[in-house]
Image (tube, rainbow, N blue to C red):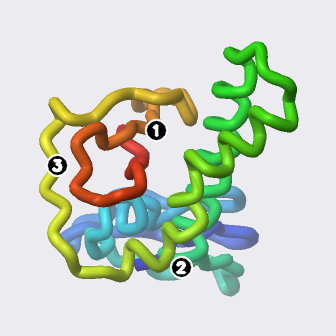
Amino acid sequence: EKLFVVEEGMVQFSCGGQVAGTAGMGSILGELSLVYGIPAPSDVKCITPCAILWAMDTLSYRRIQAVVAKESLKSSLLDKSNEPRDCQIQSLRRKCSSFLDLQEESNHSESNDIAFGQLEKVAIVGKGAFGSVYIVEDKKSAFAAKRYYSLK
């Protein structure tokens, strides 16, 4: 499960033996395997004499995702309060400490049965052509610390 960025050259990807498309400089491949945690559904082969691709593993992707979510949450929460900025930041650090351990949490095999009804939207992390990504809080968590998740 890796995300690939084509720096140079051209690659062709196919699904089930059928050519699905090509990708060149700046193209991203395999992002679905990281987002959804599933194997990439296509095969990729180089169609130029040489191609340079950069790879990002799941752990690196999740760390970047956590940092972006934390910064977005921080900016959205800091704008809504009349407290001094230092107090706001300390309060935010306490609320969002679960983001710091995201990569360790993702390796646990505990059950995370969560109903949508117990989630509350906290902030919008990003908007794009395929929808928005939100930070949500689990209001009925069985854990002592509040749980935050990103949700598309």
In the image, which disc is placed on residue 114? 3
- Give coordinates of residue 148: x percent, y percent: 42, 48
Q: Quick check: marks 1 and 3 in contact, CB under 8 Å?
A: no
Q: Is residue 144 left or right of residue 72?
A: left
Instruction: Determine which quarter of the picture holds residue 31.
Output: bottom left
The residue to which callout 1 is attached is: 135
Which residue is pictured at 66% across the width and 25% down the height? 76
Which amino acid lies under the numbered mark 1 shown in the image of this protein? Answer: Ile
Which residue is pictured at 41% across the width and 31% down the height? 130
Which amino acid lies under the numbered mark 2 shown in the image of this protein? Answer: Asp
Quadrant location, the N terminus:
bottom left
Instruction: Determine which quarter of the picture holds residue 10.
Output: bottom right
The residue to which callout 2 is attached is: 57
**Mark toward the start of the polypeptide (3 vs 2):** 2
- Give coordinates of residue 113: x percent, y percent: 13, 56
Closer to us: 145 or 49? 145
Task: Give the crowd class for mark 2: few <14, some 14-19, many >=20 residues within 10 Å.
Answer: few
SS category of the residue bearing label 2: strand
* Number of residue marks: 3
Closer to us: 73 or 145? 145
